[in-house]
Image (tube, rainbow, N blue to C red):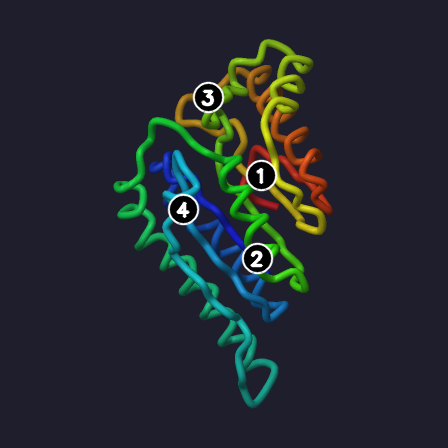
Amino acid sequence: MSTLYLDATSSSMSDEYADLASRIATRTAVCEGTLAISTFGESSGQTVTLLDQSFSVEAPTENAKKRKQQQLAKDAAATVRDKFAAAAADTSSSATDVIGVLRLVGEAQAQRPDAVHEVILATDGVTNVGVDPAAALSREAALGLAEQVKVPDLSGVHLTFAGIGRTTTPLPSATVEQISVFWERVCERTNAASCTVATQWKG
């Protein structure tokens, strides 16, 4: 089961989010899995579901099945592109609660403990409610901040943070590094099966 959370405070990213959704949908389709895509903002209660799609399809031949799955992946990207702007317009941009989203991931895992959970959070990761990793002046300071936040147990979840430090106004490389260090340590503390923190969407 794949879940994609889109940071709605980055309203200028709608086209890039659609591209990311297409990539993940294509990969999910190959496995005939399920993909859920939601936006989030300053609280975990501010999520908006854009898509909840099963890619398990029936067709007379393998080629026909692949064509159906490819079409579903294209439709998923179009849905994100069409619905994201409205969701972002209704989302406060004053802060971002990434930790709150991690708690939602824990709740989803508890509801489906037998599923393999792959979760991607598309966010710049610059601010989180209650803590500001962009303000860390060193690697040690970023690690210290990461130890202060309360995180859920996400054992078994494959967790990716994509777009870290990717803002409309480019950040200094040192700042991006501290933000990345912060989220790497937060992810490690969840006991996730794997942790990936990337500045880009692709790959």
Q: Badge 2 is on which residue?
A: 2
Q: CA distance from mark 3 to mark 4?
A: 23 Å
**Three-letter code for the amino acid on which mark 1 is drawn:** Phe
Q: Amino acid at mark 3?
A: Pro
**CA separation, marks 4 and 2?**
14 Å
Amino acid at the residue labelled 2: Ser
Q: Secondary structure at mark 4?
A: strand
How far is disc 2 from disc 1 in space, using C-alphas?
14 Å
Which mark is on residue 161? 1
Quickly name the residue at label 4: 39
**Considering only vertical position in the picture, is 74 above or below 15?**
below
Task: Tell me what residue is drawn at x 37 percent, y 35 percent.
Answer: 9
Q: Earlier in the sequence, mark 2 or mark 3?
A: 2
Q: Position of residue 54 (x, y in %)?
A: 51, 70
Q: Name the mark nearer the viewer: 3 or 4.
A: 4
Q: In this figure, which residue is indicated by the disc labeled 3?
A: 170
- The first of marks 3 and 4 along the sequence is 4
Residue at the farthest top position:
137
For this rendering, which residue is in front, 30 or 53? 53
The circle on residue 63 is none
Which amino acid does the dot numbered 4 rest on?
Thr
Residue 63 to residue 24: above or below: below
